[in-house]
Image (cartoon, rainbow, N blue to C red):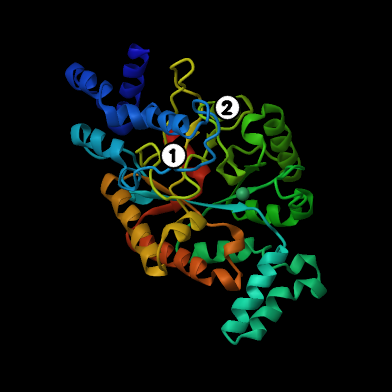
Amino acid sequence: MHEKKLAYIERLAECHSKKQFSKEILDTLSNDKLLNDLLFYYREARLQHNDNDPLLTRSYGRRLNADRKLIMEPAITRLFSNYLGVYDIKYQDDAKFAICLTHDVDHIYPPIHHTALSLFYCLKALNPKRYHEYISWNYKGKEYSPYINFSNIMDVEEKYNAKSSFYFLATESDIKGSRYEIEVLENELCNIMDKDWEIGLHGGYYTFNNLDNMKLEKKRLEQVLGTKISGYRNHYLQFKIPDTWELLSKAGFKYDTTFGYNDMVGFRNGICCPFNPFNIHDCDTIDILEIPLNIMDSSLFGMAKSPKDAWDITKKCIDMTERYQGTLTLLWHNNTFNNPFRDTWSKLYEKILRYCNEKNAWMTSANMICRNLRR
Ligand SMILES: [Zn+2]
């Protein structure tokens, strides 16, 4: 175990800056509590244990009362940078850092509670016209649903020289009943691909520990697209360490971007860059790239006290990623856009794009981040 852990730290160091630690530093690091807690999931194991959950079973993307200060900083990247300098990764157009933009497509038609909330917000804002527009798909036709809005999202991103990834569900079973049939979106999916944005699989709620479902859902989406996909994120961030990574690798995925928290933003294992995960079963590296999820819209607004606080938290994460020349991954659901009661969320998204564009960040899809690292 000890030798394999050392080898894993060495490999990460090489990915970090193509440099190596001296033997003394490597020994010190391998006994470092913080490093063991984050890189080898000791902390997650303890928290799961305290939560009466068996060791590293389903983490559900819950932070489990984690120390906020610890998660809000990329502690391992900082530790490595002390010895090795900042990341030595070349990004496109000489950008200093990267922003990975992603969208999970949970709904393509507003569910009843969204319609009710929209009515409430539009009435409060004395804007009945807006509500009328929001519900007009009911008589105009399903294709006019406000959540079939992928072109609008791409238009906003294009303004700031950005691209993104869309993750679509292709499952029959969901915790809240059936969501949508992926086949009805064929034209929309072709349009996304023609524009060179990415499409990946949003694995079903129960899929995170089921290889057959991963393969079936992948195949179903690929049949509609007529091409292979490489990326994955599980619905509700359901995840099992390290099994989900192993299964995804077996199912033929090149990368995953589920590893984050549902109820907190930040750096789950302290790294602000994609990495190959460590397998605590056989102590080897798993052949899949993890592009960790750092900021999800709902978790950000769930923890922020105000829109200003949400921006301050986001800006802090962006500035920190710029300092270490890493990659920051954002998730803004498609139903955040064209949605009266989530105007604040979609406005913040555009503010982020503007800010990162001014900083000359490389704002792109997850498969482009993956390809850039594999070069
Ligand atoms: Zn989802």
User: Residue placed at 31% from the left, 56% from the top?
Assistant: 316
Ligand 1: does it lie within 8 Å of the C-beta at label 2?
A: no
Task: Kindly identify which residue carries mark 2.
Answer: 249
User: Residue placed at 62% from the left, 63% from the top?
Assistant: 151
Q: Position of residue 71 (x, y in %)?
A: 35, 44
Q: Secondary structure at mark 1?
A: helix
**Splitting the image into 4 quarters, where does residue 273 fall?**
top left
User: Residue placed at 33% from the left, 13% from the top?
Assistant: 2
**Splitting the image into 4 quarters, where does residue 348 fall?**
bottom left
Which residue occupies the foreground of this view, 339 or 50? 50
Which residue occupies the foreground of this view, 250 or 178? 178
What's the residue type where badge 1 is placed? Answer: Asn
Task: Kindly identify which residue carries mark 1.
Answer: 372
| Left or right of residue 341, residue 210 in this image | right
Q: Residues within 10 Å of mark 1 (few under 14, many from 20)?
A: few
Q: Is residue 320 above or below residue 52?
A: below
Q: Which mark is residue 331?
A: none
What's the residue type where badge 2 is placed? Answer: Ser
| Left or right of residue 103, residue 190 in this image | right
Circles 1 and 2, Cβ within 8 Å, touching? The answer is: no
Q: Position of residue 321 (x, y in %)?
A: 32, 49
Q: Position of residue 156 (x, y in %)?
A: 52, 66
User: Residue placed at 28% from the left, 44% from the top?
Assistant: 324
Q: Is residue 87 visible?
A: no
| Left or right of residue 146, residue 234 in this image | left
**Is the C terminus in the top left, top right, bottom left or bottom right quadrant?**
top left
Which residue occupies the foreground of this view, 43 or 316? 43
